[in-house]
């Protein structure tokens, strides 16, 4: 099951992608476009996801 969850979430974003989509000092970002919408989906499911599925997602979740 964990492998399926990880596959559904996709790979965690690299730092460069975070900086591009969520620039430092930005007051607002448009969360209805990719890749941010996928990252927000991980955020929404955070309370029920196993820790192994969240490995590598910490930087993105900290920013969101």
Image (cartoon, helix red, strand yellow):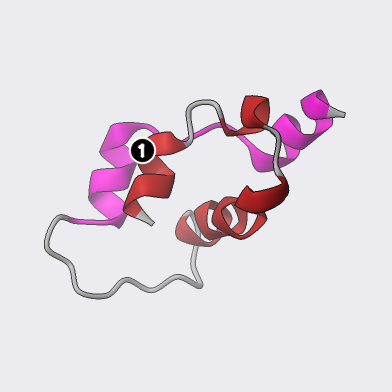
Q: Would residue 38 be found to the left or right of residue 57 on screen?
A: right
**Count of labels shown?**
1
The quadrant where residue 4 appears? top right
Kindly give the residue lying farthest to the front in the view shown.
47
- Residue 38 coordinates in the image, percent (x, y): 57, 54
Q: Which residues are magenta?
A: 2-23
Q: Looking at the picture, how far across and down is residue 22, in whole percent? A: 27, 56
Residue 60 in percent (x, y) is at 40, 44
Name above or below for residue 51 compared with residue 32. above
In-front residue for pair 21/3: 3
Observer-nearest residue: 1 or 15?
1
Residue with the most extreme left position: 25
Q: Within the magenta stretch, is there residue 55?
A: no
Name which residue lies at 14% across and 55% down.
24
Residue displayed at 32% across by 71% down: 29
Residue beneath label 1, please?
59
| SS assignment for the magenta stretch, majority | helix
Image quadrant where one finds the N terminus:
top right
Q: Residue at x 65, y 51 (%)?
A: 47
Residue 21 vertical position relative to residue 15 in the rendered view, above or below: below
- With 30 as the anchor, is 22 left or right in this view? left
Please say if 57 is above or below 41: above
């Amino acid at each position: 099951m964990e492998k399926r969850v990880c596959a559904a979430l996709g790979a965690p974003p690299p730092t460069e992608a975070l900086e591009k989509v969520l620039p430092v000092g930005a007051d607002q970002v448009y969360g209805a476009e990719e890749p941010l919408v996928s990252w927000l989906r991980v955020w929404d499911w955070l309370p029920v996801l196993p820790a192994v599925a969240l490995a590598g997602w910490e930087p993105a979740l900290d920013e969101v």
